[in-house]
Image (spheres, rainbow, N blue to C red):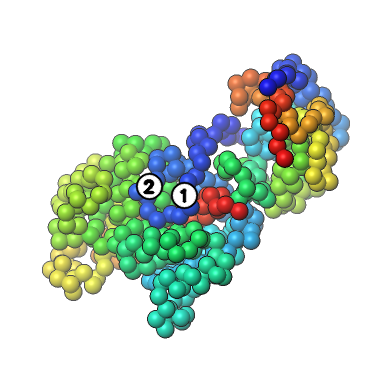
C-alpha cells in the first residue's frame, strides 16, 4: 500500500472565484488547489462507473458563439460525471440567430435557473461583461484573443504530472501569439507557477506593444532554434490559415520552413522536454506528424486532463456559491 | 473554554487493540477483509487497525482510503470547503467485507456519504463501521459495529481526535464552546 499523504500538501485555501474569467487573478496556491482537486477527479475517471453526486441538482448551460469540439465536449462530460444537469444552447438555431443580444440571452438563462454558464464568445471581454447581467457563475471557455483559462489550467496540470517541480522550468510558446487566447492565459499561468516563458513567433504575429499589455514579463526570440535551446516545455499553437490571407504571413510554406516544430529542432530542447498543443492540430504545418505523435508529445493526455480539470473547477466554483 | 483529555495515547492504543480483536472475531474470512479509512483521520486509524490484526493473526489486511467530499449534501453551506483528497481503494471491492473506519461518529451524515461512495465503487458483501468515538446526536438511522468509546456529549462541545500521523500526537479532547449555536 502506497503511503498516501495524511497531511494535505496544499493548505485549505478558501476558494474565492465565483467566476473563472482568466488566470491573471489566480495565485499559486489556488492553482495548486486546482491540481490537487484535479488529481482526485482523475481517479473518478478511472472507475468503471464514472459518476459522483457532487453537483446534483445544479444546472449548467454551455453558451458557445464559436465552434468548438473538445472544450465543449469536455465541459459537458465533466458536468455529467459530477451529476449536474447540463444543457447546450446552440446559438446557430436559437433566438441568437434571430438577433437576440448577449444581454437578453443571459437574462433568459438567468430566468431559467442556470447555476453556471460556460461561455465562448468571439469578442474579448464578453464573459466579463456577462458577469454584470447574471447571478450565475460564468466560466470563460475562450473569448476573442483574450483568455482561455481552462485550457491553460489543463496545460499546467499536464506539466505538473510530468515534472517534480514547476518553479524554474523553461517554457517556449511557438506560433501565432497575437491571435492566441491560449498563449495569453498560459503566460499568466506559467509565470505564476515560476516558469520562465519565451515567445517564438514571426514578428508580424507577435502582439504589438507586448510590454504595455499588462502581461507579465516574457522573453521573445524569433529564432526557433535559439528559443528551444534548453527548454523543458514546448507549446505549439495552431496556425490559423486565414492569417495568410490577412497579409501577416508571406506564405504557409515559409512559416513551415521557419517555425514548424520538427524532430531536429526539438532536439535543441532538453531530452525530457514535453510537447503540448491545445488542438486542433494542423499536422505538417505548425508541428510535424513525427513530433505530434512522438514520445515527448502529451497532446492526448491534455485532452483527458481537460475533463478532470474542468470537473475540479466546476466543483470548486459550486463550493463558492451561496445557497 | 475548559478542555479535557478524554483519551490518552495509552487509551487509544488499548482501544485500537481491542477493536482489532473484535474485527477478527466477527470476520472469519480475513483474506476478504478490507479496511477503508475515511479521510482525514480515519486513514491512519485504518492503517493501525490493519497492523494490529496482522500482529495478532499474521494475516496481511488490505487498506484503502476514501474521500467523501463529492458525496456530501451540504457543499454550498460549508464555510470551509472540503479539500478533495484521493480515494485509493485497492482492486475490486465486489464480494469483500469492508470495515469503514472513521474517527468520530456524530450525526451519521459522513457515514451516509461514505456508504454512497463505497457502493458506487462496487458491491461489497457487507459493510461494517468502526469508530474511535461515538458522541451520539444521530440524524440518520446509522450505528457503529465497533466503538472505541461512547462519549455522551452536548452539541455545544467539540470533540477533537488528534493522531500522531496527522496532528503530531495521540490524544482525544473535549472542549465546551464559548458561545451556543442555535
Classify mark 1: helix, strand or loop: loop
Residue B138 lies in quadrant: top right
Task: Give the residue at x 46% y 81%.
Answer: A95
Parent chain of label 2: A
The residue at which mark 1 appears reads as A17
x and y, in percent, of residue A112 in the image? 56, 70
Report the side of A18 relative to A173 (left or right): right
Q: Nearer the viewer, residue A147 or A155?
A: A147
Distance from the alpha carbon under mark 2 to that under mark 1:
9 Å
Q: Are marks 2 and 1 in contact (CB under 8 Å)?
A: yes
Classify mark 2: helix, strand or loop: loop
Task: Give the residue at x 73% y 35%.
Answer: B101
x and y, in percent, of residue A124 in the image? 32, 63
x and y, in percent, of residue A252 in the image? 19, 68
Which image quarter holds the C terminus of chain B?
A: top right
Task: Give the residue at x 26% y 52%.
Answer: A173
Vertical comparison of B102 with A274: above or below: above
Which label sits on residue A25?
2
Judge the density around disc 1: few (<14), some (14-19), many (≥20) Cα neighbours within 10 Å. some
Task: Give the residue at x 63% y 22%.
Answer: B164
Which image quarter holds the N terminus of chain B?
A: top right
Of the numbered discs 2 and 1, the one sitting upstream in the chain is 1
Report the side of B98 relative to A315 (left or right): right
Amino acid at each position: 500500500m502506497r503511503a498516501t499523504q495524511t497531511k494535505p500538501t496544499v493548505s485549505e485555501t478558501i476558494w474565492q472565484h465565483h467566476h473563472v474569467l482568466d488566470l491573471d487573478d489566480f495565485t499559486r496556491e489556488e492553482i495548486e488547489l486546482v491540481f490537487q482537486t484535479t488529481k482526485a477527479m482523475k481517479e473518478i475517471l478511472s472507475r468503471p462507473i464514472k459518476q459522483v453526486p457532487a453537483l446534483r441538482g445544479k444546472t449548467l448551460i454551455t453558451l458557445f458563439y464559436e465552434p468548438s469540439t473538445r472544450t465543449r465536449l469536455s465541459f459537458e462530460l465533466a458536468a455529467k460525471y459530477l451529476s449536474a444537469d447540463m444543457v447546450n444552447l446552440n446559438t446557430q438555431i436559437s433566438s441568437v440567430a434571430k438577433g437576440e443580444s448577449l444581454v437578453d440571452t443571459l437574462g433568459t438563462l438567468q430566468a431559467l435557473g442556470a447555476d453556471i454558464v460556460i461561455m465562448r464568445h468571439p469578442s474579448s471581454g464578453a464573459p466579463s461583461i456577462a458577469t454584470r447581467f447574471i447571478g450565475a457563475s460564468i466560466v470563460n471557455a475562450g473569448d476573442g484573443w483574450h483568455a482561455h483559462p481552462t485550457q491553460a489550467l489543463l496545460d499546467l496540470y499536464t506539466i505538473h504530472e510530468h515534472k517534480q517541480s514547476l518553479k524554474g522550468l523553461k517554457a517556449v510558446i511557438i506560433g501565432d501569439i497575437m491571435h492566441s487566447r491560449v498563449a495569453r492565459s498560459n503566460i499568466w499561468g506559467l509565470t505564476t507557477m515560476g516558469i520562465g516563458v519565451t515567445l517564438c513567433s514571426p514578428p508580424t504575429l507577435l502582439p504589438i506593444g507586448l510590454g504595455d499589455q499588462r502581461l507579465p514579463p516574457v522573453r521573445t526570440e524569433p529564432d526557433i532554434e535559439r528559443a528551444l535551446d534548453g527548454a523543458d516545455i514546448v507549446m505549439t499553437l495552431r496556425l490559423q490559415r486565414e492569417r495568410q490571407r490577412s497579409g501577416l504571413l508571406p506564405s504557409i510554406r515559409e512559416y513551415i520552413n521557419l517555425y514548424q516544430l520538427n524532430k531536429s529542432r526539438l532536439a535543441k530542447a532538453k531530452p525530457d522536454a514535453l510537447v503540448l498543443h491545445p488542438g486542433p492540430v494542423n499536422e505538417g504545418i505548425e508541428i510535424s506528424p513525427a513530433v505530434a505523435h512522438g514520445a515527448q508529445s502529451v497532446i492526448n493526455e491534455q485532452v483527458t486532463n481537460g475533463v478532470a480539470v474542468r470537473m475540479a473547477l466546476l466543483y470548486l466554483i459550486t463550493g463558492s456559491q451561496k445557497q | 473554554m475548559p478542555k479535557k483529555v478524554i483519551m490518552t495515547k495509552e487509551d487509544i492504543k488499548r482501544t485500537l487493540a481491542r477493536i482489532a480483536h473484535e474485527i477478527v472475531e466477527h470476520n472469519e474470512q480475513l483474506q476478504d477483509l478490507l479496511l477503508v479509512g475515511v479521510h482525514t483521520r480515519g486513514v491512519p486509524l485504518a492503517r493501525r487497525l490493519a497492523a494490529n490484526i496482522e500482529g495478532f493473526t499474521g494475516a496481511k489486511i488490505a487498506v484503502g482510503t476514501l474521500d467523501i467530499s463529492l458525496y456530501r449534501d451540504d457543499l454550498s453551506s460549508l464555510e470551509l470547503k472540503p479539500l478533495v483528497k484521493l480515494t485509493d481503494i485497492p482492486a475490486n471491492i465486489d464480494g469483500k467485507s469492508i470495515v469503514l473506519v472513521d474517527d468520530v461518529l456524530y450525526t451519521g451524515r459522513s457515514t451516509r456519504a461514505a456508504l454512497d461512495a463505497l457502493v458506487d465503487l462496487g458491491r461489497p458483501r457487507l459493510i461494517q463501521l468502526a469508530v474511535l468515538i461515538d458522541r451520539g446526536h444521530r440524524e440518520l438511522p446509522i450505528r457503529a459495529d465497533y466503538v472505541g468509546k461512547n462519549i455522551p456529549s452536548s452539541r455545544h462541545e467539540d470533540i477533537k481526535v488528534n493522531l500522531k500521523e496527522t496532528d503530531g500526537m495521540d490524544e482525544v479532547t473535549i472542549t465546551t464552546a464559548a458561545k451556543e449555536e442555535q
